[in-house]
Amino acid sequence: MSDADFLSAAIAEARLGLSEGGVPIGAALVVSGAVVATGRNRRVQLGSAIRHGETDCLENAGRLPGSTYARATMYTTLSPCHMCSGAILLYKIPRVVLGENATFLGAEELLRANGVEVVNLDSAECKALMDAFIAAHPEVWNEDIGEEP
């Protein structure tokens, strides 16, 4: 399967999150060509401060040995923020594939500076999801990224 195929699992999570009233960001953790876990931004749904797509995905993966993370790729519909990038670095995930970074540029340079391969697929579908959400719910988006409206 290709990066675009695995990103589709993250996009499905983003769409599910949107249908639940949340921010449409999804993630998938892939190891050795298999999706191990998926997740979505569930800050709104759970009243959580930390359940971004990537952190939700890691939570859903459960406890894994370090050797599993060392072979993993994190697929995410949006450039990972500093919190999510920190989790990626903590677990030594060597590769991140993102859907887009036009609506939000996260900590990609931090990831690269620490040896993580970062691939941007520049997905029009991911960008359209975020553009529509930000236009409709700017207050929720600003809260999600720690900004004031």
Image (cartoon, grey):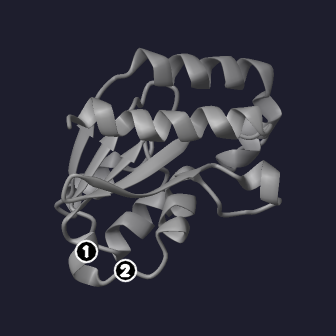
Q: Position of residue 3 (x, y in %)?
A: 24, 36
Q: Position of residue 19 (x, y in %)?
A: 74, 32
Say which residue label 1 marks.
68
Label ID, residue 137: none
Is 38 left, or right, of 111 in this rendering?
right
Q: Relative to 23, does residue 52 appear above or below in the rendering? A: below
Q: Are marks 1 and 2 in contact (CB under 8 Å)?
A: yes
Q: Relative to 21, does residue 110 appear above or below in the rendering? A: below
- Nearer the observer, 49 or 57: 57
- The residue at 21%/71% (across/down) is 70
- The residue at 48%/25% (across/down) is 126
Kind of residue at disc 1: Thr
Q: Position of residue 8 (x, y in %)?
A: 41, 33
The answer to whether residue 23 is seen in the rendering is no
Q: Position of residue 97 (x, y in %)?
A: 30, 42
Local packing at callout 2 (Cα closer than 10 Å; few below 14, some 14-19, many 20+) is: few
- The residue at 81%/35% (across/down) is 139
**Can you tell which quarter of the image residue 148 is in?**
top right
Q: Relative to 57, does residue 149 appear above or below in the rendering? A: above
Local packing at callout 1 (Cα closer than 10 Å; few below 14, some 14-19, many 20+) is: some
Say which residue label 2 marks.
64
Indicate the quadrant containing the C terminus: top left, top right, bottom left or bottom right. top right
- The residue at 65%/37% (across/down) is 16
Kind of residue at disc 2: Leu
Indicate the quadrant containing the N terminus: top left, top right, bottom left or bottom right. top left
